[in-house]
Amino acid sequence: MNNNPKISKQDMKRKKVFKSYLKIKRDVFFGVLFLVAVLGIIIPLRPTVSTIEKRTLTTFPEFTWQSFIDGTYFNGISTWYADTFPFREALLTANSAVKGLYGLQSEQLVGNSDKTGDEIPDTPVLPSSDETTEATTEATTEAATEETTEEQLPDGAIHDIPEASGNVYVTGDTAFGLYYFSTDGANAYVNMIDKAQKKLDGVANVYDILVPTSVGIMLDENAQEAIGASNQGKAIDYIYSSINSVNDNITTVNAYDTLKNHNSEYIYFRTDHHWTALGAYYTYVQFCNAKGIEPTPLDEYETIEFPGFVGTFYSGSNQAPSLLENPDTVTAYYPKTTNDMYYIGSDLSTIQWNIIMDVTGWDRASLYSCFAAGDEIYAQIDNPNVNNGQSCVVIKESYGNAFIPFLADHYEHIYIVDYRYFYKYPDYNNSVYQLVTENDVDDVIFINNADAMTNPNAAELMSDMFN
């Protein structure tokens, strides 16, 4: 007797449909897997630079027998494969969008670094230098002690205090990079600029502009302390006091107080570590006061805007959705007398450019490059509409880019030196002294942000230009 249950035609049909469904699902899975594998091995599709993370991606490792034997060659291939996968930018953006579905975080700290800044001395400590002479430590710079005559404006500082420290602090739609004071770096900077002035003594005037970053101006001091950031106001006072203690022939420009007084205005970007052109303008006014020239009123400039700017803090915050959804706008002010300049490219070719370049349509992360050709080996502005015989050298990093356009109406010639790359330019043998003497330069202007002024490596690069 057959005890097997009888299977109806309907059940057999249902079973057949289910098997077909499983087969389709399996085929789709392996098909997608195969497609991804094929995409992964198509070299031309692999990116070399990440605009979101602002870095050059891992390159394919060079083969050596040593790396082959110890396994580092294959580890390098694995890292290269993962780091340069096709469409990685789109995948990162999608990942950020998915994170955003969890809701916006009002505060977050990214990095959770254990790094802390050095204690900032209350009085200047004379840095060690062969050229440093004994001087009183009670002296302070004119910039550090002068009473501001500016109207006191509303305080625009953010007062939110987080629970822990990290590298990038995001509060609402605004991010800040933490600042850590370094005694060694600060003293190296003092030594460097003292050396530079003595090299240029009797040849050119030396101006020093130390620019605080946004965390030192736009974030309340209690909040700065809570996240482990050093006080930039005290750091700048220490450096300027130390400079004055060893050399009173350097004119220092007080950017900190004027920016602090204007911190209710749009003087720093929220998604990027740079200042805006408005912040640079207020500092330019202070420079004009120090030099004894008349600044151009802000309302006399023509402007151009580039909306949609999403800068370095976006990548540094692991693509915080609140920053992407609230991009910055870059506003640039055209010089009144000329907009022409040139720069030296990486291949040492001469490239004609604009002081304020129209970057409409450029990548959203590159809009700050509208200022003075960005970060190049060397650049120069020759203004045929200024006939005062004045010229200057500007020694800078990227903060100087937004500052330089305001100088264009005051000098016949502006020689722009990015100290990070100037050594690549053969014409002056990495010598600012040679540049100054060959071109009869009147002023040498150092403009550095707070991070650069306490970085021993930055000070060394600048010092090497005055050997």
Image (spheres, helix red, strand yellow):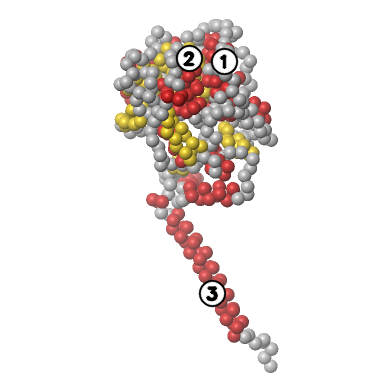
Circle 1 is placed at which residue position?
A: 148
Q: Is residue 1 above or below residue 228?
A: below
Judged from the image, the secondary structure of the residue bearing numbered disc 3 is helix
Q: Is residue 32 above or below residue 437?
A: below
Q: Is residue 132 above or below residue 71?
A: above
Res 129 seen here: yes
Q: Which amino acid type is shown beneath numbered disc 1?
A: Thr
Circle 3 is placed at which residue position?
A: 20
Q: CA distance from mark 3 to mark 1?
A: 81 Å
In which quadrant is the N terminus drawn? bottom right
Give the mark nearer the N terminus: 3 vs 1: 3
Q: Which amino acid type is shown beneath numbered disc 2?
A: Asn
Circle 2 is placed at which residue position?
A: 289
Relative depth, front residue between 285 and 450: 285
Res 81 seen here: no
Judged from the image, the secondary structure of the residue bearing numbered disc 2 is helix
Relative depth, front residue between 268 and 111: 268
Tell me whether the residue at label 1 lies in contact with that at label 2, contact meaning CB atoms closer than 8 angstroms: no
Give the mark nearer the N terminus: 1 vs 2: 1
> Residue placed at 47% from the left, 17% from the top?
287
Total marks drawn?
3
Q: Which amino acid type is shown beneath numbered disc 3?
A: Ser
Judge left or right: residue 149 versus residue 394.
Answer: right
